[in-house]
Image (cartoon, rainbow, N blue to C red):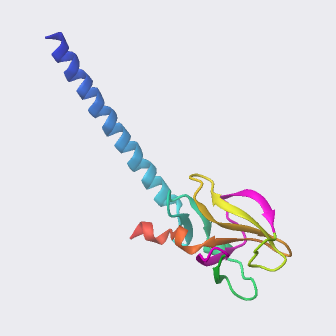
Amino acid sequence: MAAVDEGGLMEEKKNRNHRNDVTTELKQEAKVKTELKSDDWLCIVCNKRITSDKERFEYDNQSEFQFINPGGFYFDILTFCSADGCREMGEPTLEFTWFKGHSWSFAVCSRCSNHLGWKYVGKYSFYGLIRSRLIKGAALFN
């Protein structure tokens, strides 16, 4: 009889822990949504805030570019002055740069390490982020 009661108590505790986990998760989601703004750009994998439209950067009078890398991969790039949600990886290089005179290194999400684009340094310092690897904050509100 004790084993049955113990099993029942364990199941109840398990259910209570699950409810607490769900409640915590919902509270975190609500907090994220209240802190985000519709003009924020987020990592598509983990929804971390990466940057915002206020940080858009114009290079040669534009902030959107299309490039093909040496491997034949096509990228739609958005340029930003800063991207606080990114961290840089790798040694900067001028090899195959898309912005003349600007070295690049990888820019990854600081939370999940998803490759989001590149950090460029030269006459200007800016980020070129891959549009398909970002999601607009407004999308979370719809």
Figure quadrant of residue 9: top left
Q: Residue at 44%, 70% (x, y): give it.
A: 139
Left or right: where does residue 77 sit relative to residue 141? right
Q: Nearer the viewer, residue 44 or 101?
A: 101
Placement of 57 over or under 10, stated as above or below? below
Q: Position of residue 94 (x, y in %)?
A: 81, 71
Q: Position of residue 1 (x, y in %)?
A: 13, 11
Q: Residue at 85%, 77% (x, y): give it.
A: 101
Q: Residue at 69%, 67% (x, y): give it.
A: 118
Residue 78 visible in the snapshot: yes
Figure quadrant of residue 16: top left
Please identify the residue farthest to the bottom as the structure is shown.
61
Query: How many numbered callouts?
Result: 0
Q: Residue at 81%, 80% (x, y): give it.
A: 100
Please identify the residue farthest to the left as the structure is shown.
1
Placement of 80 over or under 30, stated as above or below? below
Left or right: where does residue 19 sit relative to residue 63? left
Magenta span has 80?
A: yes
Specify the quadrant that holds the C terminus: bottom left
Magenta span has 119?
A: no
Q: Position of residue 26 (x, y in %)?
A: 38, 49
Q: Main secondary structure of the magenta part?
A: strand
Left or right: where does residue 65 sit relative to residue 20? right
Please identify the residue farthest to the front as the structure is shown.
71
Residue 85 visible in the snapshot: no
Q: Which residues are magenta?
A: 70-93
Q: Position of residue 84 (x, y in %)?
A: 67, 60
